[in-house]
Amino acid sequence: MSERIVIGAQENLLETLVSRMITQGRDFSATAVIFPGKRPAHFLRKELAVRAGGSIIPPHIYSVDDFILFLYQQRFPEPVRDLTPIDAAALLHMVHGELKERLGGEYFTSFDAFIPVGLKLFGELEELRMANLPENKMKEVLSSLTYNRLFSLAEYYTKLYALAAEKGFTTRAVRYREVADHIMELDLSGYTQIVVAGLFKLTHAEQIIFNDLEKRSNTLFIYQSDKSGDGTPEPEIHFYKASDTHGQVFALSGLIKKQLENHQPLDERSVIVLPDAEALFPVVHHTLTLLDPEKYNIALEYPMSRTPIYGFLNNLMEFVSTKQGNRYTAVSYINFILHPYTKNIRFGNRTDVTRILFHEIESALTKDKSKILLTLEEIEEWDELFTNVAFAVSDAGNPVSPEQLKNHLHAIHASTIGALEHCGSIREFAHQVIDVLTTIYEQSTARLHPLFRPYSEALLNVFLGLEQSFAGSASFQDASGYLNFLQQYISLQNVPFAGTPLRGLQVLGLLETRNLHFDDVYLLNVNENVLPGSPGSDMLLPQQLREQWGLETRHDHDQLREYYFHLIVRNAKRVHLFYSESGDSDKSRFVEQLLWERQKRDGTYSSDSYVQTVRYRVNLANETVTPIVKSDEVMALLRGFTYSASVLDMYLQCPIKFYYRFIMRIEEKEEASADLDSRDIGIFVHTVLKRFFDPCVGRKMELHDLQPGRMRRLIDELFSQKFGSEPAGESYLLKRQIQRQLESFLNDYQIPAVQESELMIRGLEENIRIHAFGAKFEGRLDRIEQRGSKIVILDYKTGYSKNKKIIVVDKLDVNNRSSWSEAVTSVQLPMYLLLYSIQTKTDVEHIMPAYLYLGKNRIGRDCEAEFVEDPGERAAAFEQFKQLIDLLLQEVNNAAVPFAPPADLGTTCPQCPYTGLCGTAWIKGWTAS
Ligand code: SF4
């Protein structure tokens, strides 16, 4: 007689199973146990051994998939040739090519475009196959689906499985169907007992198979409800709300730390459950580092697309696919060479040389914007660069020649870029990738990086499989096809962390917890978008049809997740549930339900008292940046210092920033970009205006000096010198914009100005150096202009900041230090006044410094913004400014006053490049949240 028992959620499935097993001493080999997955096998064997008090002959333990395979091979004993998803996609592509009515019409003609749809199609066809429906019925219904040409699904279905059989492949669904169709003929008499444990939600084929087993006399079915039995103790549940995953991990680490300090056990009876693999890295870096590596075990599937080895390959292929003629984009080259696996390729035994070489190349390419596209030969012929790097990396004992560096770079190019440039098929691509990965493994320090081995093994296995696969003969038109293939197929693979299950604290995905029992559960990301979340991808078949045919629906997906959630929670003694609440993240409906149950039980109106809020960011927000004390060396440097407007502006903004930039000389890193940034544009426009107005210096400006045609030609000439002669895309648009803006400057500002009054340019880009207040000052004045008796000092601004006041005079109280940075945005214009008045001994009332905003939408005479228009007020404001400079210099030169952070970190730090040094990177997230 078969038997069926249902146990409550709080019961231990394995213990129940063991207690019901028929044994002959220590020999369990006559029993077959079938679980939904593979993991419980380890725990069952351990449980049996513990109960037997020593070694045992274990039962045959199968996952459902393995059990079906075992039965299938009773009918077809030869080795199974499994149809992998990519092979299926290749077969479906063949079918696709033959059909008149294709999914997506002509859109998916090439194989790389078809891959995503092919993979999805295969998944749905497998489900249909599993549904064990009569073929005629299925074809009839599929043929009636007109939406999205789904009626052709019947043809894809029939032809795919016919082709697969013809080529000797089977699929999971084919095996299930075959076993379901012949289950009555299959022999299980070799087992005196068959135990099927922990199944939930069966497919149609599974139902047929297990229904038949139920009719047999020696089978025991153990099901587990996700409801607790009446009167059974509820687990102790704690809820933690954080603003993001890092907050959750912060709270988790706090709990683990406390448990360790209290010497409470953290063994295989404790589990950290990660339903979203995104949390794995923070947990590895912040929580698991509290433990000895021998004291935990990770078992979950991690997305390949998030691994550094995939990132390396993706960067490399992105670079290769930018090739036009024999040129590639500089930005993608920089991305490739700066990947940690590339820049850490050894030069002999040294690991520093390649890094220095690649950072030098990056720096040179970033500065030289004309190199938007380049050839590998150009880089390999960059003699000056090799000479500089050779000098930098050589010492007496280790001379390095430019020639050696050149050869080294050439070898790297050949073994990476060269290897993947001309692949004729997926097989060849796979072969070449394996070679590249081997090179990286052997020649770079990558293998020393954490988790390199599981990541690279998983990736290698995927490519080794491709070498042997049916799809291997498929090819793509060019490198971008192989890049698509990488991004559409390889990125979808998972890295299986199989782990050593019986060792220490378990870190598992949600599915990996199936059928297992834990005392302490730490469940992260219990958010609605994760639990239940949504099915992996949109379903092709309509939900109604899925329901009708017993295929998985969205509702089934939710139910399955709910079942596993309640099981892991109700099966434990202590549960800690973590979730994020901010922006679009909301707590899961499962958490809502648990909170609601508590409210009902306690008769409360609010759930707030059950939830602990993780305040890690608040604590960080209270942290301050430590002021930097001025050493004797720093004081000596300050004594000889030359001040400029930008130096003083930076000091006013943040004295620590001034210290890093001008005393430590740590420069802000320029980002590599294919686009021209505002700094490049600013420099370019200054150069154009200098060249354009040079002929007018020292004489009256005339209308014929201001011809737009000359301006246009000058921009053409300088643009091609600086950024290349064939600007494309954004560079082209930018050039057009500069031309338009400067022509408008001539027509709407400069020509009217000349018509209005006589003017003469006295100087362009003039450097001025003076001594004042016991210190040296310097500045470069864009344009000095004489308008009647007035001297106008113009500073070109290519951006436009509307209401930005330079000094809010009435806010400035020189005796109140905290008012300085609030009232003064920039000392630039008064500084020009100071420089020019002292240098030329001109009365300040006759000098008017002003910004000239060239970036305004509508350029006109009003794009000048003066530093205090009225001469009398200007003189008064200038007096205040001089006092400010005096006090500022006294502060800078006072050894007792350290370099201090700004009063409001939240306003100043997020834009600062030194957040890493000050430890204020958190502010960005904090102020944004
Ligand atoms: S990060 Fe903040 S405190 Fe540090 S230098 Fe920048 S502005 Fe100053």
Image (cartoon, helix red, strand yellow):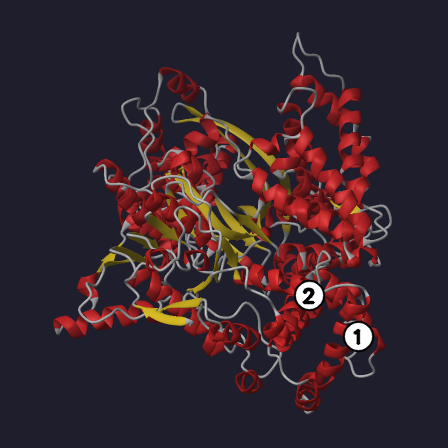
* Residue 100 percent location from the top left of the image: 83, 83
Q: Is residue 406 above or below residue 244?
A: above
- The residue lying toward the viewer, choosing from 121 and 830, is 121
Q: Is residue 366 left or right of residue 926?
A: right
Residue type highlighted by circle 2 = Arg
* SS of the residue under disc 1: helix
Residue at screen point 29% across, 43% down: 256
Write down the residue under mark 1.
96
User: Does any atom of ligand 1 lie closer than 8 Å to the CB of label 1?
Assistant: no
Question: In which quadrant of the rendered image does the C terminus lie?
Answer: bottom left
Q: Secondary structure at mark 2?
A: helix
Task: Decide: is 765 above or below 825.
Answer: above
User: Where in the figure is residue 819, as x and y percent of width and height?
Assistant: 28, 45
Asked if residue 123 is positioned above or below residue 672 in the image, the reply reads below
When the figure is inspected, residue 679 is found, relative to residue 273, above or below; the finding is above
Q: Residue at x 83, y 51 (%)?
A: 324
Q: CA distance from mark 1 to mark 2?
A: 32 Å
Q: Which mark is residue 75?
A: 2
Q: Amino acid at mark 1?
A: His
The answer, for residue 877, to whether it is visible in the render is yes
Q: Residue at x 33, y 57 (%)?
A: 19
Instruction: Look at the image and tell me whether residue 718 can be seen.
Output: no
